[in-house]
Amino acid sequence: MSGRLILLRHGQTYGNVEKRLDTRPPGAELTPLGRDQARAFARARQDPPGLLVHSVATRARQTAGEAGGLLQVAPRECDGLHEVQVGELENRNDDEAIEQFGQVYQRWHEGDLDAAMPGGESGSDVLARYVPVVTDLRMRYLDNHDWTDDIVVVSHGAAIRLVGAVLAGVDGGFALDNHLANTEFVALAPITDGRWSCLQWGSLTPPFYPEPDADAVQEARTAADPMG
């Protein structure tokens, strides 16, 4: 039986506290709470992962370092796993910028992957750099019948939600409605024909459906950390 791919959002950063669109590596560092969250994730695991990788961003490296220290697994850095690049919106936390980000991000989950952040990436750009890394991990490890361990990938909320939804066929409305808090994760399992099954999304398990209350959904989206 193969292990799972755990797409883990990093711990809390100073940028998260300020609700900034902090996407360009190396980016903000973890807060003390963020470091505690990373260690709590490690303590909650029954078994150490067979592999622990992280993006090039400081917050992902620090999260992997804190977790890896307790799990006694040496983290590895991997290109392509960084956050959605927001271009001209970088480091802004004003309502206009967050609304612009949300509008483009919503279009991706509605199927318009060619829409781009102003001066930044399109959904297709994100998938083009991220999915090959995931595919390589699958081919090297998870598709090997002798491999039974999980692979933990420390990455970023908006990128994880997009990649997780696309790979596992999760409803785009659900992905939009359900942000990932710091150190929450999406768990994917490899299934036949190169496909993936989503086993867990944050605290939720299948089936994954969008929330029916449109007003409540909109309130949740605007109140949440925009990068979650």
Image (spheres, rainbow, N blue to C red):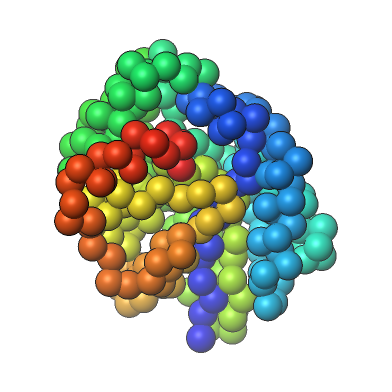
* Direction from residue 9 to residue 109 in the image, left or right: left
Please tell me which residue lies in front, 139 or 49.
49
Viewer can see residue 219: yes
Viewer can see residue 76: no
Q: Which residue is painted at 33% across and 16% down in the image?
A: 96
Residue 175, image x, y percentages: 31, 51
Q: Quadrant of residue 55?
A: top right
* Direction from residue 132 to residue 52 in the image, left or right: right
Residue 26, image x, y percentages: 64, 28
164 lies above or below 57: below
Q: Which residue is painted at 65% across and 30% down in the image?
A: 14
94 lies above or below 223: above
Q: Which residue is painted at 40% across and 66% down in the image?
A: 204
Residue 112, image x, y percentages: 18, 37
Please tell me which residue lies in front, 44 or 51.
44
Q: Quadrant of residue 84?
A: top left
Residue 176, image x, y percentages: 30, 46
Please tell me which residue lies in front, 207 or 118.
207
* Direction from residue 5 to residue 119 in the image, left or right: left
Q: Which residue is painted at 53% across and 38% down in the image?
A: 82
Total numbered labels placed on residues in the image: 0
171 lies above or below 96: below
Please tell me which residue lies in front, 46 or 146.
46
* Direction from residue 155 to residue 44 in the image, left or right: right
